[in-house]
Amino acid sequence: MKNNAVVLDTNLFFSALIPGASAIRDILLESNLVFYCPNFVITELFKHKHKILKHTKLNEVDFYTYFNGIIENISFVPIETISAKSRNAAFELCKDIDVCDTPFVALAIELHLSLWTGDKVLREGLSKKGFTDFFIP
């Protein structure tokens, strides 16, 4: 396992865009960690860009400034490169918690990395099933 790398979930990516969430953004921008994320997250961010702008009160220039700084520090992995074995294992873990988190768990399994999530329900649910490899800053 790479001790200096973690898989990042969507919620933390979104949180890093919030002006007051500087602790998360600071870790993403200034730490020596390598971050991995499924590549569909970029599409999700743009799909919800107007909602993000509304809730964060960012203007578009600030949004893109934060966004560009953050994505420079993330390695995006195409979902199709994750093995069926890892995807299936992740689905079994996530199916009765939140199936939308399957790609992040699958990527963590595939790369043998910790998962960084702010989702308490996900962490607790996965922990009960034996997945306990979480990054906690």
Image: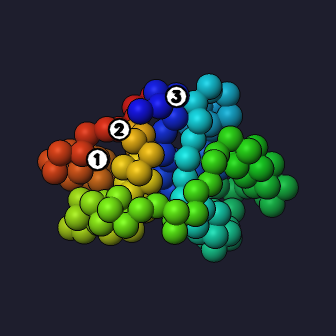
Q: Are marks 2 and 1 in contact (CB under 8 Å)?
A: yes
List the residue tagged with mark 2. 134
Count neighbours of disc 1 (C-alpha within 10 A) and say few if under 14, some if 14 to 19, many if 20 or more: some
Residue lying farthest right?
61
Determine the residue positioned at 52% across, 63% down. Answer: 81
Count neighbours of disc 2 (C-alpha within 10 A) and say few if under 14, some if 14 to 19, many if 20 or more: some
- Given this view, does label 1 or label 3 mark the residue nearer the observer? 3
Determine the residue positioned at 30% across, 66% down. Answer: 88
Count neighbours of disc 3 (C-alpha within 10 A) and say few if under 14, some if 14 to 19, many if 20 or more: few
Mark 1 secondary-structure assignment: helix
Distance from the alpha carbon under mark 2 to that under mark 1: 8 Å
Query: How many numbered tags mark residues here?
Result: 3
Q: Which residue type carries mark 3?
A: Asn
List the residue tagged with mark 1. 123
Q: Which residue type carries mark 1?
A: Arg
List the residue tagged with mark 3. 4
Which quadrant holds the N terminus? top left
Q: Nearer the viewer, residue 105 or 88?
A: 88
Determine the residue positioned at 23% across, 50% down. Answer: 126
Viewed as shown, does residue 59 lie left or right of 21?
A: right
Which is more N-terminal, label 3 or label 1?
A: 3
Picture quadrant of residue 114: top left
Is residue 94 in view from this perspective? no
Mark 3 secondary-structure assignment: loop
